[in-house]
Image (cartoon, rainbow, N blue to C red):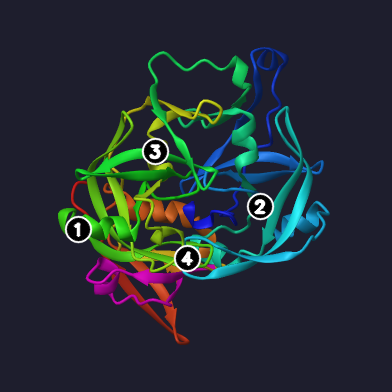
Amino acid sequence: MRSMRQAVRFFAGLLAVCTVCTWDARASGIAADVPFELIDNRVFVPAMLNGKGPFQLVLDTGADTGGISLQTMRAIDAPAAGRERVGGAGEGTDAVIKTHIASLQIGNAAFHDLPVIAERFGALNDVIGFRSFDGILGQAVFRRYVVEIDFAASRVRLIEPKAFHAPARAIGVPFTFYQGFMPLVRGSVAGSRGRFVVDLGDRSSLTLFGPFWRAHRLDTRLEPGLEALTGYGVGGPIRGIVVRVPSFTFGNASARGIVARLSLQKSGGFADPHIAGSIGTGVLRRFHVFIDYGQHMFWLEPMAQAPDRFDRAGLWLGRRGAQFEVFDVIAGGPAEAAGLRKGDIVLAIDRRRTESLDLFRTREQLRDPAFNDPLLFDYERGGRRGQATVILRDLLPGG
């Protein structure tokens, strides 16, 4: 997530216990072969920190130093070594604690004395919806190994660079580094060319930064668009105009039918005038990915592509304790038509109490074009309870 550049984005989920590499895997140059879980378009891998864990960490090309939550910092007895303020995609800054991890292990791949930052991410957990969060893996992993992300098998492999050979049918996409650590590629959207960072921490498929999309009038060329809350990062909420992009190319690779957001941020990472935008996991997951920092190359094996799905209810559901909260409602969308408002606490959906529902599965249902039954929302507003029937419909063409 460019939204968490130096501070990174921290989100957590539950992962299977780390699978230690076999002797044959080590002999073939694979230092780690571990399962990952894709949650909210973020890759979570298991790791041991200071001999404790496993902890579940986000794999992120958009992070300079790594990071951990304050809870993780206490759990591994990491020392505090000062404070600073950091910025990201949001328009504000957050306070963080500087610390370090004595040892980090992923499979048989070991790292030592890593500087990291620690932060309280309560707002992120609420808006994004994670019940807990452990931390993030940044540049230390990518600088040391060729990183393979097998989205079809849900595996991450760390390969010794000398043992790596690019697959014969893979598409090679060269990159340079922006600000010394973020992969930077050439790309084109709606006939407009620019430089794009590649950010595994960006939950979107494609984020177009304000100076770029305004200069090329992409809001009119890619209309119709919908203004909405599109995420939350270091510094606060991220609003954008959501559009569908028929085709996006970067290097010799392409992605079709993707949902993009035109950032409305006035400051922060997504207002950077030197960059066209950010390529997120929503694009990368369409490929079998190999990331080779030593050779400055992405190697991409294309997989079957289906158009991105966008929310068909016209709202952003986050978490408020055991219940869900409506953090945003799209003007003219089904949720607004049903009477739901920003700030409503959702107690039940179709008579099922929200404390028993998985927030991310609920969001998937709200995107699923095969799910067309009216949904009954029981909610609370200002101490009073009400009900709203939401009739789902496609809000972006081409889904």
**Which secondary structure, mark 4?**
loop
Magenta extent: 323-346
Residue 299's spot in the image, x, y percent?
44, 25
Between the residue at mark 2 and the residue at mark 1, the CA separation in whole angstroms equals 37 Å
* Residue on which the image places disc 3: 185
Q: Are marks 2 and 4 in contact (CB under 8 Å)?
A: no
Among numbered discs 2 and 3, the one appearing first in the sequence:
2
Residue 87 seen from this side: yes
Give residue 131's quadrant in the image. bottom right
Among numbered discs 4 and 3, the one appearing first in the sequence:
4
**Which secondary structure, mark 2?**
strand
Magenta residue check for 341: yes
Among numbered discs 2 and 1, the one appearing first in the sequence:
2
Residue 35's spot in the image, x, y percent?
59, 33
Between the residue at mark 2 and the residue at mark 4, the CA separation in whole angstroms equals 18 Å
Among numbered discs 2 and 4, the one appearing first in the sequence:
2
What number is the disc on residue 67?
2
Image position of 39 (left or right of 349)? right
Q: Nearer the viewer, mark 2 or mark 1?
A: 1
Task: Residue type at mark 4: give it.
Answer: Gly
